[in-house]
Amino acid sequence: MEKVTLPVTGMTCASCSTHVQRALEATPGVAAASVNLMLHNAVVTFDNTTLTPTDLVSVIEQTGYTSTLPQPDRTALDEQDAQDQAQAAEYQDLRRKAGVSLAAAAFGMLASMPLMGSGAAAGHDHGAAPADPFLAWTHRVIDPWLSAALPWLYAIDRAGLAWALFVVTAAVMGWAGRHFYVRAWKAFRHHAADMNTLVAVGTGAAFAYSVLATAAPTVLTSRGVAADVYYEAVLFIIALVLVGNTFESRAKRQTSAALRALAGLQPKTARVLRGGQERDLPLDDVVVGDVVLVRPGERVPVDGEILDGASALDESMLTGESLPVAKRAGDAVFGGTINRTGAFRFRADRVGADSAVQRIARMMRDAQGSRAPIQQLADAVSAVFVPVVLSLAVATFAGWVVLAGEGSLLQAFAAAVAVLIIACPCAMGLAVPTALMVATGRGAAAGILIKGGEALQRAGAITTVVLDKTGTVTEGRPTVTDVVVAPDADLDDDALLARAAAVEAASEHPLADAVVRAARERGLALAPVSEFSSVTGQGAVAMVGGERLVIGNQALLVGEGLDASALAGAASALADRGRTPMFVGTTTGRPRVFGLIAVADPIKATSRDAVARLRALGLDVVMLTGDNARTAAVIARDAGIDRVVAGVLPEGKVAEIARLQAEGRVVAMVGDGVNDAPALARADVGLAIGSGTDIAIEAADVTLMRGDLGGVATAIALSRRTMTTMKQNLFWAFVYNVVGIPVAAGLLYPVAGVLLSPVLASAAMAFSSVSVVANSLRLRTIRLGRDADDIPVATPASKQQAPGCCGCCEVRA
Amino acid sequence: MTLIESSTLAAAVAAIGWINWYFFVAGRQTTRVAAGAGGRQDVVVRVDGGYEPSAIQVVAGRPVRLSFDRVDTSGCSEEVTLPDFGIRRFLPTGARTTVDFTPDTPGTYVFTCGMGMLRGRLVVTRATEA
């Protein structure tokens, strides 16, 4: 018994609801029905062995009201879970059926041995060739041995043996092979045909012929055709196709392993503070605003923001970043990540389908369901494939009869069946989607989210990679790189930085932020500031501790009557290295310059290596920036990029990409996804560098969750390998059919005397689709070059992670 | 050519003709969908070894809801994909799974099972043609 709530619309009065209720109650299999006029629904308890919710909907609709099946409200991971369960059940079922049919086929082969001799013993001439060369061969090999070992078998009445085989075959067809016939029939009713059609027609024809040979052999023998039975061929075909399906089912499950791994990330419960008490709640019960506690070693249950406590979190499952990320109050945490060291409390911000892991899962499922353009040919072929094969089988039969004479009816028949059985539309259908599924999963594990098959195909063809400078090649956050104290200034680095930071704390300039941050990171106290005024394009002036401080460029110093000639050499050297020097001085007392502070947007520690990998892939690397040529050239040299386009305005980026495309290049644009959205969209492939788990980057074809350039080369290498795999799969799937079908039809027979047994044909067909899936699965383990997701790179990344580290440390080191 | 041979040949030609007629020509009528409340074009597609209806005509620029009502248990039909719209859904047996999207560009799009064996067509026409 099962209970279901169905919406019923259109009911306006009590008599309407009574009408619906009576109709439901009168339906056999319904135990109870309660129709509620106000809630517009029907709660029905029914026998789920005889009725389905769909039947109940049609009962309601027959009363003149409308109803729909309840909407399954599912997240991507729920969907995956349900699909996994359905596939696991299918796999178990197939495995059992394959095992039993194999046993039945073995029995069938033994039992048919004495029968095979019958034709020859009775003096029938089989014609030039045995109808089924495989069975004839087994007969030659096994028959002498079997007749010695089991003489009683040969003593059994031949008709009795044939009937026993008939019973076994009918049972296997009706049980293990039932779905072939049922599905073939359903497809036929829809004017469609698929693999089931081929198996059903092939085995059905062989079975029908055998039944005729068993029940009315004279019909055949009177026309000079051997009344052989082919029950064992039917058994073997069903068994081998099922064995193939079993392997295929298992392999197909593995193609979605990455999504399954994602589903396994979320803990089942969360420790939530409610009413002042800690309670373990099922994940579904956690709501936005709940305060959640996480201890060391536990997984974070949902997304949120840390309220108090600090820890290092392993986010590798989401971003591919192998090193733990330090987090403290105010930082975002993500469901599914592992809390390594400290305990903390956080407020749940996003739960259920909104959480990062669920959105990644949704993106992956959508990507896996998309189509790569390379599939179009396979689509076009498979749309007409089965009807064409059916036609070829008929033509094969007629061709044999006409060319070899009516005495070859049996060979004609066997060849036609072999054509039906060897043809395999599945391999073509699986060639591209399985590779796409494995590749998107493999990418996600490395922190690379690929939007779909089309993006992947284009990424495989990239020739030129355009990198945005700020935030892509560089950190995107100016940092203090040098603090230089003037020879005559009577203070140290820290005192200079503290003075500058005190002024800059009142400023909103991005460079000012770098100075303040550097002071805070050194633990310097900032004195209160007054009379702050900023001089646009030059710097700022303010009173700090009774001292009038000036901070800015050469022009500002000149305006304030300060002489910085002692530092001119240092300033010029820093500018040559792409850094921006800011002088710090005072006009109180003796006007003097204390020193200078240089600020730069440092290149990411991983950029240089990433650019080298791109070049190793044979790609041209171009950097675009709005900066001046001198700064840009320095950054480019540090990163190993030899082509720079500087002074480009945001709209100029789009034009530059269009220009590269006009040169015939396939251009990838790498940017942060926010400022570069138009350029990302214009490029053939837009790759957005996400920050952490910010994955909803609309304009991008590929999102790199790790936040550095390393993923670009990995994404391109993965795309290239995937395209290779897809082409291999398609090639073999086509070649298999193009070669297999003519051989099965007997085209080689006049030349080489080669005939293909339907039994061998079934083995070949089963193998062909399994081999395609297996080839796709190799993408899970291929190496993608010097890759951070293969080998954890400790040195550059740890520099980034070390607390309190800034550009200064790098320079001093 | 004997009688059996010639009649086999004739029968084969007839059979091939019939096969191609049945699978490629017959059963190609398109179901035209009228917009319901709110302009949404609702259609229920029964999934039972094939899609019923298998050819659906809708108007461009208005939302479409395809409700897949899967009744069979074949692993083949467990997923439906609309590759041109980037949609892939698992269809639980005995439940109705809806897919919402808005086709903006007129044309013929396919919806298929996960392996592309079961096929349906979505014919999107300009609003004025409908």
Image (tube, grey):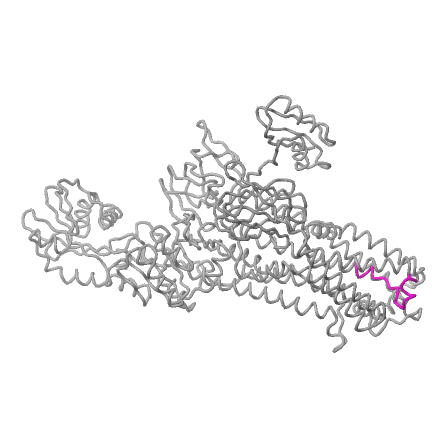
- Give percent across and percent down for residue B65: 55, 42
- Give percent across and percent down for residue A175: 77, 50
Q: Residue B126 versus residue B53: which sits nearer the camera?
A: B126
Compared with A798, B93 (above or below) is above
Q: Residue A105 versus residue B130: which sits nearer the camera?
A: B130
Question: Residue at position x 51%, y 52% from top?
Answer: A367
> In the rendered image, which quarter is residue A654 located in?
bottom left
Question: Residue at position x 34%, y 56% from top?
Answer: A472
- Give percent across and percent down for residue A236: 77, 60
Q: Magenta span has A232?
A: yes
Question: Residue at position x 46%, y 53% from top?
Answer: A449
The quadrant of the image that shows the C terminus of chain A is bottom left
- Give percent across and percent down for residue A59: 68, 33
> In the rendered image, which quarter is residue A27 located in?
top right
The quadrant of the image that shows the N terminus of chain A is top right
Q: Magenta span has A752?
A: no
A204 left or right of A687? right
